[in-house]
Amino acid sequence: MPWLYGVVRNRIGDEYRRRGRRAELQCQLNEDFALRMPVSDDLYAEVRDAVERLPQIHREVLKMTYWERLTAREIAAVLNMNSAAVRARLMRARRMLRAALSELQDPAVEEVPTHE
């Protein structure tokens, strides 16, 4: 039944595209956080682009975890791997995303020029 996992994975991808990427992110934001710190269109685009640049398997695991709210066991069943492999890929995906986002510089926090 490996073909079934492929079908499920494709259907999940179709659903992501149908909903639109912005709606996906906004649905996942914690309401309290969203009220205190709204996400700008630019920041949203940077995060979306960073996620899309991840290797496919890391991107899939990240999206299934945060957008679909699946557990490691559920993701393992869909991707036909064990839960430990899912957790390892999720850890790598987070590390890669953190590195990609740390390269972005917030214009509001630019380095202050020194007067020499």
Image: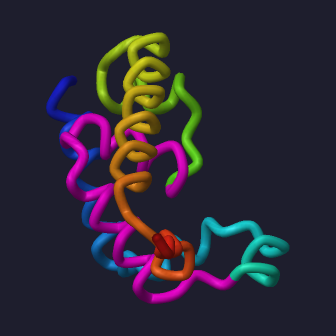
Q: Residue reaching furthest front?
A: 116
Percent x, y for residue 37? 72, 79
Give above or below for 20 relative to 14. Answer: below
Quarter of image, res 2: top left
Q: Which of the 4 image quarters holds residue 81?
A: top left
Residue 13 screen position, x and y as percent:
27, 59
Residue 11, above or below 21:
above
Residue situated in front as seen by the camera: 101 or 66: 101
Q: Residue at x 43, y 18 (%)?
A: 88
Q: Report the magenta residues as a range.
A: 38-67
Position above or below: 65 against 88: below
Determine the residue located farthest toward the left in the rendered image: 3
Q: Quadrant of the N terminus?
A: top left
| Residue under the image location 24 percent in, 46 percent down | 54
Task: Report if residue 32 lies within the magenta region.
Answer: no
- Between residue 84 and residue 115, name the one nearer to us: 115
Q: Please provide percent x and percent y for residue 105.
A: 41, 67
Q: Main secondary structure of the magenta part?
A: helix
List x then y, in percent, for residue 30: 74, 67
- In this image, 26 relative to 13: left or right? right
Is residue 110 among what the camera can see? no
33 vs 21, left or right, is: right
Give whichever of 61, 98 is nearer the camera.
98
Evaluate whether residue 11 shows in this view: yes
Q: Tell me if residue 41 is in the magenta stretch.
A: yes
Residue shown at 54% from the left, 51% from the top: 66
